[in-house]
Amino acid sequence: MVKTIKALGIRAPNAEFLAANVLKNPDTPGEEVRFIVSPGAEAGMEAVARKYGYKAEIAKGEKEVEVRMVPSGKTTEEIDVTGETCPGPVMIVGDKLSSLGIGERLKVKSASADTIADVSAAVTASGSLILNQGKEGDRNFIIVEKAEKKAVAAGTAALASKDRVVVAQSNGIGNAERAYATFIFSKVALSMGKKVTIFFLMDGVGIARKGNAETVKHPAFPVLSQVMDEVIKAGATVYACELSASFRGIKEADLVPGVKLAGAATFIQLLSDPGNAVVNF
Amino acid sequence: MDSTYLVIGLAILVSAMATGFIIFRMQGMHLMAHFVAIILALIATLAAVVTGMTVAVYAAVVLQFIVTITAYTQLVPTLKDSFQTSPGYSAHLAIVTMLPVLALAGLLL
């Protein structure tokens, strides 16, 4: 967790004195502190940082300057996702970010610029910030700062950014690629901080029948039942269409744990909600 | 034993390789046992046609039966719940279902 102190309007050298007092009396030893000061007030803060064993990182904006006091020796965490294929990088970065506190930074590196672009999209969607990006040798990189997702007023939130994803699956285990895609896309959406609802209908309900997903295996992925289990445990809401289940003689007791029967009204409601992004497999 | 039925069986197995490969891509590793059975039956049937040896003919007949049995055991769990995608499997099932009939005909007629 990074402590943020807004000191706009305080001029030099008072901002310097304020910084010295804060660094001298930290809430927790070695904590990172971020000062937001007016332009010009950052003068002398580098010397204060050195005096108390910190390193000052200054980012100048038009109306305010961010002075980040990082304890000396503390480095930004780095992960290299080179060689990982989609959705691996997004999920690795999502997991790492979830373990960081607000304000903490992560450097993500990859030999593939496309992978970095994909990770950037996921990071931005989850509310975090891209502070810097570029290339070092053969590695593309971004520096991510974890931030809290900004709340938007109710009603407009859904329209401003679709934070909920509905995955409609109607092909079942008869099409292994679509079956895998259902859960892999869901995992990515969950790692981006989105709320995921999976709706099995028509042939799709076959996936939810106990034992069926265990028969589907692609060499590049774990068995389908394992991927489905991970998605359910990660918090996805999973429904199976009651009508489609009845057509196939599937009862609630035949469904894998975590899947509930739902009627057409639930599906229509999910489709009608403007806050839901709908994906069909 | 009439080798005509063996040659027809061989032609069906070659066709089954094509239709089998298409459904193998839809189903993945789940069909591995069936795919291996097709390859072995193809080799045995080819050997029976070329050599005419009784042992090879019997091996071909047994393997052709196994091809049909594995097709059904591997695909029925999928077909049970998949109404919309089942036509994708019909060509392969239709073709391999001919095999036991031809195999018996080759032995008995």
Image (spheres, grey):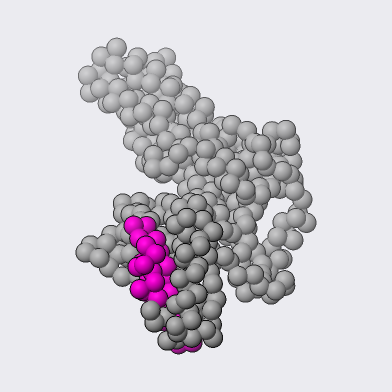
Question: Residue A240 versus residue A47: which sits nearer the camera?
Answer: A47
Magenta residue span: A45-74
> Is residue A70 placed above or below B92 in the rendered structure?
below
Q: Is residue B76 visible?
A: yes
The verdict on residue A59 being magenta is yes
Would residue A157 be found to the left or right of residue B47 on screen?
right
**Residue in the image at 57% along x and 35% along y:** A212
Question: Residue B35 versus residue B46: which sits nearer the camera?
Answer: B35
Q: Position of residue A249 (x, y in %)?
A: 72, 36
Q: Is residue A75 visible?
A: no
Q: Quadrant of the C terminus of chain B?
A: top left
Q: Residue furthest top?
A: B55
Kindly indicate the quadrant of the structure image that contains residue B63.
top left
> Is residue A124 placed above or below A29 in the rendered structure?
below
Q: Position of residue B39 (x, y in %)?
A: 33, 29
Q: Quadrant of the N terminus of chain B?
A: top left
Q: Position of residue A26 (x, y in %)?
A: 50, 61
Q: Position of residue B28 (x, y in %)?
A: 43, 39
Question: Residue B37 versus residue A211: which sits nearer the camera?
Answer: A211
The verdict on residue A218 being magenta is no
Question: Residue B32 versus residue A209: which sits nearer the camera?
Answer: A209
**Residue in the image at 46% along x and 65% along y:** A23
Q: Total of numbered circles in the picture?
A: 0
**Residue in the image at 46% along x and 53% along y:** A96
**Residue in the image at 72% along x and 66% along y:** A272
> Is residue A176 placed above or below A111 in the rendered structure?
above
